[in-house]
Image: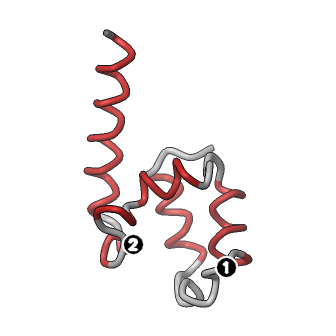
């Protein structure tokens, strides 16, 4: 029961934090950051940078600054 509550709390917390980021302009519902992070196993700053800079959709994310990515890392509590 504690595990379910903790997971739900984390999801709501992450969703709430993610809503405040620039990324959420495009990343909504099925494309939300928490879902993408979970699907792509993004757990660290390096994972996020690699996907945004070298991944299939790097071209779409080319205007995102390193500082904005660092802010996302901070807000999404990545290592």
Q: Residue at x 55, y 72 (%)?
A: 67
User: Which quadrant of the structure image shows residue 28?
Assistant: bottom left
Q: Residue at x 34, y 20 (%)?
A: 4
Name of the residue lying farthest toward the top = 1
- In the image, which disc is placed on residue 35? none
Q: Residue at x 54, y 68 (%)?
A: 69
Q: Quadrant of the N terminus?
A: top left
Residue 16: percent from left, percent from top: 25, 50
Image-based side of 36 in relation to 48, left or right: left
- Compared with 61, 39 (above or below) is above
Residue 35: percent from left, percent from top: 43, 53
As helix, strand or loop, the secondary structure at mark 2 comes to helix
Residue 14: percent from left, percent from top: 35, 46
Q: Residue at x 39, y 16 (%)?
A: 3
Residue 38: percent from left, percent from top: 52, 48
Q: Earlier in the sequence, mark 2 or mark 1?
A: 2
User: Which quadrant of the structure image shows residue 51?
Assistant: bottom right
The residue identified by callout 1 is: 56
- In the image, which disc is placed on residue 23? 2
Front one among 24 and 32: 32
In three-dimensional space, the C-alpha distance between marks 2 and 1, rounded to whole angstroms, equals 17 Å
CA neighbours of label 2 inside 10 A, class few (<14), some (14 to 19), many (20+): some
- Compared with 18, 3 (above or below) is above
**Numbered label tally:** 2
Label 2 with label 1: CB-CB less than 8 Å:
no
As helix, strand or loop, the secondary structure at mark 1 comes to loop
Image-based side of 9 in relation to 45, left or right: left
Image-based side of 9 in relation to 72, left or right: left
- Compared with 50, 47 (above or below) is above
């Amino acid at each position: 029961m504690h595990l379910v509550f903790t997971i739900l709390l984390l999801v709501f917390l992450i969703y709430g934090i993610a809503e405040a980021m620039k990324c959420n302009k495009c990343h909504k519902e099925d494309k939300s950051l928490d879902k993408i992070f979970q699907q792509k196993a993004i757990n660290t700053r390096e994972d996020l940078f690699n996907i945004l800079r070298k991944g299939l959709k790097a071209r779409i994310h080319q205007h995102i600054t390193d500082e904005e990515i660092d802010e996302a890392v901070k807000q999404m509590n990545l290592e």
